[in-house]
Image (spheres, helix red, strand yellow):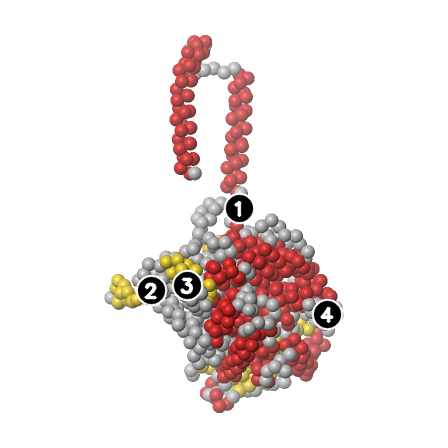
Amino acid sequence: MSGSGRRTVRSRVRSLSEADADSLQERRPALNRHRERSKYGSSIPLFRSANLRVVLGICFLAFFVILFMIHHLLLAEPKLPRAVTPLPAPKIMDLPQFQGEHKESLYWGTYRPHAYFGIRARTPKSLIAGLMWIGVKDGRYHLRHVCRHEDDLSTYGWTRHNGRDFGHQVLVDHGMTLTTGFLKSKSEGSGYGGDWAVRINVQLDKSKWNEEFGRGAQLFFYLADEAGNALDVSGENMNIHEDSLLASGSRADIGDWQLHLKSMDNLEMHYAGFHTPHFHNLSDFIEENLASQIRKHARLELSDSLDDSPNVLVFQIIGGFPFTTDIALISGTDSDSSRIEERVSMLTGISLSNQLKYKEQEFDEKFEKIFHLAEKVDSESISVGKAAVGNLLGGIGYFYGQSKIAVSRILNLRERVNYLPYWPAELYTSVPSRSFFPRGFLWDEGFHQLIIWRWDIHISLDIIGHWLDLMNVDGWIPREQILGAEALSRVPEEFVPQHPTNGNPPTLFLALNDIINSLKNNEFTAMDRSEISQFLERAFVRLEAWFHWFNTTQSGKQMSSYYWHGRDNRTTVELNPKTLSSGLDDYPRASHPSADERHLDLRCWMLLAADCMHSIQELLDKESKPGMNYGSTAKSLSDFELLNQLHFDDALGAYFDFGNHTEKVQLKWKELEAEHNYAARQLVRHVLERPVLRLVPHIGYVSLFPFMGRIIPSGSWILEKQLELISNRSLLWTNYGLRSLAKTSSLYMKRNTEHDPPYWRGPVWINMNYRILSALHHYSKENGPYQAKAKAIYEELRSNLIRNIVRNYQESGFLWEQYDQTKGKGKGAHPFTGWTSLVVLIMAETYGKI
């Protein structure tokens, strides 16, 4: 088309030049005659004065039109690229159910999960609070603040947290044990969001503590105002036994506020105030201040000084072991009915003790009411289950900022750029790991919500709504949310940009499917049913856009096939190009990425999405739009014969991906050119055989997706084959759960690059084991020749998973990202509550319809 277009232009130029030549010959006599009539014998033709005025007027007008157009082009804002343009639909979070009392009740919270203890409000420029302390490791002092593996704490995490107004956390740091209690209160006179209190208790295990480092603890509690408001210290000489007031200030959202500290122990207090626009490196200010004091006065004490108009206040609390201190923030102190002393008294001392104890009992009762574990597992397992739920809810965070979007080619901009900022957005979400992944991950969140909606449907809908409101005009949601300076400070630069061509498993449909089925079974109150229906009505346009994005951008060449975009087909260092968008990272796919691929797991995710959309459509009594018949799409994707044609290997009795593949790929060391007289080498990918289009013969989690999706009929011989694959110790079965990749795979436990150890190539992952258990539970209830076998495998697998997770928690103090398939030891990030918390649903045998 472009070639013919160019030919057309060229032919048009030739025809015009020929016509002009002819017309010039015809006009010359006339022109000569005109010249002859010229009074002055000029070769320039004369115009009548009237015509001249018209021409000048036209020229004058044209000049201003051109000037206006140039001005407009220079000043007009370029149209935003679609990748960073919001979906033009009403925001879910604007629904009335998320306003008013609901919004205020969730205003304050422990929404800084990356910190060992951190409080903020659900607002972009919040008053934030946090705890630091001096710990001892390897004979040296270290300041603790943000959760880090290298701190090597014996354990830390919430043993109980209700997601709203209460939490209890234990942190064990080389002989020193800190417990933090959190409580919110809304009473007469409170400002917006109410008040909150923190109890910090410090204990010592003398057998693990060297007294050379002191007989007491040093804590640092800080307040910082992100809006830049100045904070006031109560006085230069702090005597908490005479006056509990530490600091005060004022904000537009909560009015005037005061911070109070009370303790029955003999505590020494120091302070420092800083002015800064940055809040992701607050520990640096404290370390620098302490270092300066040590140099000047040989004392490990804050300077008792303030910058001008400080917006950060830090209070050093020094006390002998053991000691307890209560800190309370009282809002709305400018109110006539503020009752400050009474409210401080309610949030400290014996009153706080009683309230914390009551909240703990309330948590335990609610936990048993929801999960019914007393009749299913032992007390040790119940304790781990409570910690799993508490850590998941305590790991809910609030973030605000702009994602960084990678765009290869930008149109409508005056200059080429590689990255664009997403619009400023907020996200209320649970996080997978407070130490390693303290931010939102899209495919993790769907698994989180399987627990959270059962605990608190309103919190769950709030989280799902925040995620869906991040959708752009094409229906795409960035898969990893790195919002704000604190989040950015924890992520290597190369992992920050999000790619609008790449997806992530739409696992939110897992939770939505569960919620809808419970709605159908009348498991909610009338009020909750109404709010869920309103939520789905508002969310439907976004869910449709999301489904359409997947169905168009990730579709394959074959009908009803899909493939994950974003694989690197030019890599020279990866043994098998990663599929990060699938969430399964290094799980073996076709050796040579191409548009001919068919990814089995994505096809099954699309079935889940289509089935859920059809259920919502029926629930809301919506008519199908042209090209959007979710019922027929679900029927097509669940077509057993078509599935087998595209993905089943009769000889192996297993389902596989399809693509351009060879097994003969390996990594070999290659010597590089020496730099600075140092020899260097690199592992480089070598392909020893030409790839061909074929099924990709790696048995593992992906092979079991049709089984997880319950697509296989209960009477089919293929179901028996799946059960054999699952229970075969030479393939997937271990005493600790099902391994992610069969031992027979050529890539089993193989490194993918010099620096990438195996990730989804053997270790046991709990989210996939949960889904497999769910399917086993389903088939154990279905009449058929393999019902008894499914039940036996289900019971043993469930027992193995629970036993190993509980054992690891008792030995290590953590839930883990994955578990070693040979010895069952926890591996990877820790604490990794995230989807490992699904162990509580495994204990409860609560699987839903997925």
Determine which residue is flagged by label 1: 79
Select label 2 or label 1 by which is in front: 2
Q: Residue at x 43, y 74 (%)?
A: 731
Q: Which residue is drawn at 51% across and 33% down?
A: 66
Q: Depth check: 670 or 659 in front?
A: 659
Q: Depth check: 769 or 90 in front?
A: 769
- Report the number of discs: 4
| Label 2 vs 1, first from the N-terminus | 1
Q: Which residue lies furthest to the left in this view?
A: 677
The answer for how far apart the CA atoms under marks 3 and 2 are is 12 Å
Q: Which residue is drawn at 49% across and 63% down?
A: 601
The answer for how far apart the CA atoms under marks 3 and 1 are is 44 Å
The answer for how far apart the CA atoms under marks 1 and 4 are is 48 Å
Specify the amino acid type for callout 3: Val
Helix, strand or loop at label 3? It is loop
Q: Position of residue 343 (x, y in %)?
A: 70, 75
Specify the amino acid type for callout 2: Lys
Q: Where is residue 598 in the image (x, y as percent from the top left)?
A: 46, 58
Specify the amino acid type for callout 1: Lys
The answer to whether mark 2 and mark 1 are in CB contact below 8 A is no
**Is residue 182 something one can see in this rendering?**
no
Determine which residue is flagged by label 4: 189
The answer for how far apart the CA atoms under marks 4 and 2 are is 73 Å
Determine which residue is flagged by label 3: 696
Marker disc for residue 664: 2
